[in-house]
Amino acid sequence: MGKAPLLLLTTTGRKSGKRYTTPVLYLVDGDRWVVVGSYAGAPMHPGWWLNLKANPRAEIEVGRQKVQVTAAQASAEERTRLWPLLTEMYPRYNDYQKKTSREMPVGILTRVE
């Protein structure tokens, strides 16, 4: 993953109700964190993204800081703006997108005040 930054994303299982923690690459966009549901180009979305769709409240750990966040899918306009920044950070996202027919979701994580 080269020099791409990682955060720990803790979601609530949509079926089990259990908490799951997953390392995810991220990009800082102002005061938000941007993540991609790439699943390495698999035909289905990653479990953590499906969990966020069912329950958008989550926790991230960036360095030693834990932050409560709410997740939302980037709008088409946001995705258009963010995708080049994401692929500059981690070029393999382009390869993953070519492997799958689904549009890999771009998620926006916003701090809960």
Image: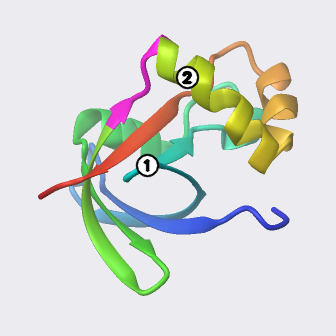
| Mark 2 element type | helix
- Amino acid at pointer 1: Gly
**Residue receiving disc 1:** 30
Please tell me whether residue 78 is drawn above or below residue 68 in the rendered image. Answer: above
Question: Which residues fall within the magenta stretch?
Answer: 72-76
In-front residue for pair 89/44: 89
Residue at image x 25%, y 35%? 54
Q: Is residue 43 left or right of residue 33?
A: right
Q: Position of residue 99 (x, y in %)?
A: 84, 24
Q: Quadrant of residue 98?
A: top right
Residue 18 part of the magenta-drawn span: no
Please tell me whether residue 25 is drawn above or below residue 91 in the rendered image. Answer: below
Q: Quadrant of residue 39?
A: top right
Specify few, some or many for label 2: CA neighbours under 10 Å numbering under 14, 14-19, or 20 or more.
some
User: Of all residues shown, which one is farthest toward the left?
Assistant: 113
Mark in the foreground, 1 or 2: 1
**Residue receiving disc 2:** 79
| Mark 1 element type | loop
Q: Position of residue 43 (x, y in %)?
A: 68, 25
Please tell me whether residue 110 is drawn above or below residue 65 in the rendered image. Answer: above
